[in-house]
Image (tube, coloured by chain):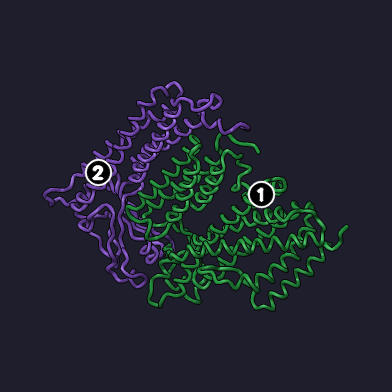
Chain colours: A green, B purple
Amino acid sequence: MTTEQKPRVAALLSLTGAFLMFINALLVGINNAPIIISSGPVQSPSNVIGINAPLWFRISFGIRGLVEGSSSIIWIIAAIITMYLAVRLYARPLGRKGLCTMIVALSILSVVYGGGFVIGLILGILGAGMGYEWPTQHKNTIAYKMIMAMKFDSNLYEGLKTEKNALRNAVYALVLVNILTGAGIGLYSIAVQRVLGATATSDLPFRIIVLGELPFDISIFSTIIINVGLAILKWFALSFIIYLVAIALLERKQTFAKIAAATAFAYAPVSLQLIMPFIFTSQPNLATTWPLYLLVVTNIWMALALVKGIGQTLETNLGKALGILSLSGAIYLLLYGLFFSTFDIPNIIRLTIQPQSALLMLVSSLAIGSLLFEIYNKS
Amino acid sequence: MNRIYMLLSALALLSIFFIAASIVLPWWTLQISPEARIIFNSDFRNDFNLFKTVSSSYTDNSLEENATTSIEVNLSNLTSPQQPNPPSFAFMDTTLQLTGAGLALTIPIAIGAAVTRARKYLRYILTLGYIAAVILVISAFYFSQELPTQVSGLSSISPIDLPSGWTPIYPGDIASAWGGKADSSGQVSTWLKSNNFWTWQPSSGWFLALSAAFLNVAACVAIQMIIKREQAPPKGSMAAGPDRTGALNPETS
């Protein structure tokens, strides 16, 4: 495996992320409030709260109640420390593990003041992830492989076939993805629960939806832990189903570890669910529209990444890969609907197919759909 | 190593830009709170800058065509001729001088990091960088310390008359650089409980000056770290060389 003399890309990504965090902290300080970009002015509370409220949305950079007043100085200092750590990562990479841990911690903390317009947060975590694995070349790091998976890059899956620690790295990626999604969905879900559970005279829904307040609950940590545990089970089940289908129908000689590694990296787009708590909509759409769109888009993205990954790993064309995925997906969806979706995870929003007849119809459609891709034709 | 020096020079240049911008941008702002802005569909702000002027603007978005009224006056216009001891705002001159000094002392860091020949003096230049940072921090905190006393001595806080029905604001309400005044009209409280109608806080110029100070410190600490590393004797085997990272990279690409 090739190595790098300096963690240049890692430091550059972290520095760019930290710079965005700094600009974000500065603007929030000057504004003395979160920076809120909304789809339109709010003329009255009934415009955003109530069953007849029209669709309205806003993105908030910063959490109301945590960025006002002199506290903004702390956030500016935190962002500058992140910049310094990124420079230090480049200049003295030998202490990278401690440096990268601090960069990740400060990047997560930046959520309070807007996460460097979200992009800074993502770059900070990616850069620190790459820095952590230095002197491994940045293209061989877990963080970069996650980007490759999102880009449907075939080089990722070709590399996984020969990589010694592919499965171990893939599990790390899977855990990271599910920590991020657990945190994003958990925070959003807590806020939605507070809005829906508020009394008619409470001003909390207005503060959360319009002014950018984000309530915190300690149960978010159980959400993250249970989400990671369940995600590992789901990944194992999906990988095993794909393995069985591929072996039985295509008679491909590929190890379970390689298929499991490709499957785990395909989960990378799901990490974008982290951005869920930055955007809120008017109340009737709060628990449905925005989370639904985000979950559907990221899951379809993941499915496409999986098609690419399985196709490359099994050395088959995309049509057959799609067929294998249709059949495996049908079995997995049945398992998900009957087993995984029954787990009670606090503060989680997930896609469920209801009623069960609809689930069965989808499962049978996928199973029949797999016939179209000639996966049963071994020639 | 040149690349890191260029990066640090860029940091110092950013700091210089921030200080220069801070001189012309407002240092303190009085405005209506975000919630009042939404509820009244209007904006109102008074920006105080270091040249002893205040620019006031009022925008009413509820009208068919957005009506904006803007005016810039000297702070002396907000005092009454009958006042026995009107505030002089001399502290703004001091702040301006301190910020100017901070700017002058930051320039050598950018030059020292960018120009190879100047690097032998970098150790001494760093001292100037730290002094500049201290001066900028002092100027920011001195400003925020002095401002409330002087503003509370004005006879009026805004050159534009406030719309009727709004919570009035008086110079005496300003007790500290950061603060707010609760809504007394009852209109905000129909939406929100116990929220501010007015908020005031240091503005962009103040934040830029303070950020420049922190950037100076970050750049100086980083340069110091690099100088220390360059002067450290090589550790371990000869193969490691002065750049200790090389020892880890037998297959350097």
The residue depicted at 25 percent of the width and 60 percent of the height is B169
Chain letter belonging to callout 1: A
Is label 2 or label 1 in front? 1
Labelled disc at residue B82: none
Query: For the residue marked with disc 1, what is the amino acid?
Result: Ala
The residue depicted at 50 percent of the width and 67 percent of the height is A189
The residue depicted at 42 percent of the width and 29 percent of the height is B228
Q: Residue furthest left?
A: B84
Query: For the residue marked with disc 2, what is the amino acid?
Result: Tyr
Quarter of the image for the C terminus of chain A: give it.
bottom right
Horizontal relation, residue B148 to residue A89: left or right? left
In the rendered picture of this protein, how many numbered marks are placed on residues?
Answer: 2
Counting from the top left corner in percent of width and height, residue B155 is at: 19, 54
Residue with the mark numbered 1:
A166
Dots 2, 1 in contact, CB < 8 A? no
Counting from the top left corner in percent of width and height, residue B95 is at: 26, 40
Counting from the top left corner in percent of width and height, residue B226 is at: 44, 30
* Vertical arrangement, residue A115 with respect to residue B163, above or below: above
The residue depicted at 33 percent of the width and 37 percent of the height is B133
Horizontal relation, residue A3 to residue B57: left or right? right
Residue with the mark numbered 2:
B142
